[in-house]
Amino acid sequence: MLALLSAHNATAQPVVQQYTFTLNNAPLFGGNPKTNQTMDQASCQAILANIQSTMPSSYTITTTGMPNTLSWYDPDTKIGVTDTCLKDPRGLHRTHVASNQIIGTPSPVALPTSPMVIVADGQSYFGNRIDELMIAAPGVIGYPYLYPDQPSTGGTLQYQDPDPMTDGQGGNVLTRLATELVTSGKATGVVAGSVALGGSSIVQHLPGTPQYIKAEAYLRALGHGLGLIPTYILWDEGQTATFAGISTATWVADFEAIVDGYNEDMGLTSTKWVVAQESLGYGRPATYGAFNAADIISDVESALNIRAAQAAVVGYNSGQVLTGPDMDALIKERFTLDGVHPDGVGASLRAAAWLPTLN
């Protein structure tokens, strides 16, 4: 891990740009109103340049990835975003639509006896950004609260991609992890749900934020509708916090405020939080070239600050917070498109890394 960070200071190798591109988060600064719209490279670069030119002077801006990547941080709201033109040689989002039509509507299934309840939170690994969809194994269910086109009286459904409570339209590491929990015998059944937000930083999950309110609504629905509380909340967030330059002390204070909020607002004192080590962003898809540590696009010092924070919260509240997997150690494994999100095999590798942390 530290070797990867040390290698970051080497000169990045140029990448041949030869495919269509996708722009993230442009609506925040008057770009195209549809997130993840495929366009040609020149159009995407033009929107990024316009975002940069209209950025308030108080923002911290990182332009080292331009003309294809622009990172910014608002010191007032403590929100940071990375806008990126992403290589999309396989028409990822069109593939998502076609795959979703093949998978179809989830089927009603019975609630397993004494299920393990897994709620995933954080960023895009749990936010439907994997480029392959799947249906979870039998025994893995989702609760239809907030699911599209489901009656409010609820019921339990076979869990499958994409999880409609988070913001992407692709596959999810959670689907693969829940499947592994059942097929490995670690759980006889799993109730799975993700309240993650792609590209988010920890400040967007604090008590009182829209994301916190959304998560609270789902967790209360689990309790009222099924009489369940989470066995584990899996926390996988840190890349955007690294880009934003959030300090170790601030990240720790924010995370503890979230845990305290869940305990006080929802009574989840028996729920265990499992926190991944997650801080690095990668600038080149490994699918289209050998891994090169020089293409790590995260600031080294900031990444180490976030990793230190994630380690520091372990044991918080008399052992309520547990150590999760080191996702940074998997940075070179099976990425596609933007170098940040894995393909289906890469997602399974990350699910396997979570598995031994859940007992």
Image: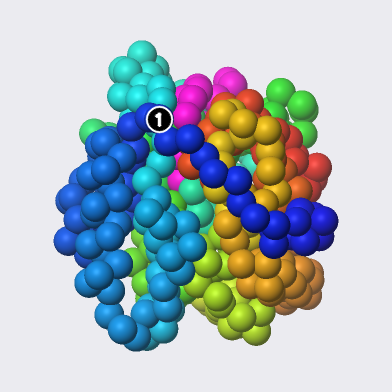
Q: Tell whether position 343 is magenta.
A: no
Image coordinates for residue 280, horizontal then vertical, percent: 63, 56
Is 148 or 250 nearer to us in this picture? 250
**Image height check: is 305 above or below 286?**
below
Q: Tell whether position 138 is magenta.
A: yes
Image coordinates for residue 244, horizontal then vertical, percent: 50, 72
SS class, disc 1: loop
How many numbered discs? 1
In the image, 183: left or right of 19? right
At 36% across and 14% down in the image, what residue appears?
A: 102
Q: Is residue 7 visible?
A: yes
Is 150 or 81 nearer to us in this picture? 81
Image coordinates for residue 158, horizontal then vertical, percent: 47, 26
Residue at the disc numbered 1: 18
In the image, 252: left or right of 124? right
Type of amino acid at the residue the image marks with label 1: Gln
At 34% across and 38% down in the image, what residue appears?
A: 21
Color theme of the render: rainbow
Disc 1 residue crowd, few under 14, some 14–19, many 20+, Cα 10 Å:
few
What is the quadrant of the N terminus in the image?
bottom right
Image coordinates for residue 33, horizontal then vertical, percent: 17, 51
| Magenta residue span | 127-142
Question: In which image quadrant can residue 310 be found?
Answer: bottom right
In the image, 348: left or right of 45? right
Is 258 or 326 nearer to us in this picture? 326
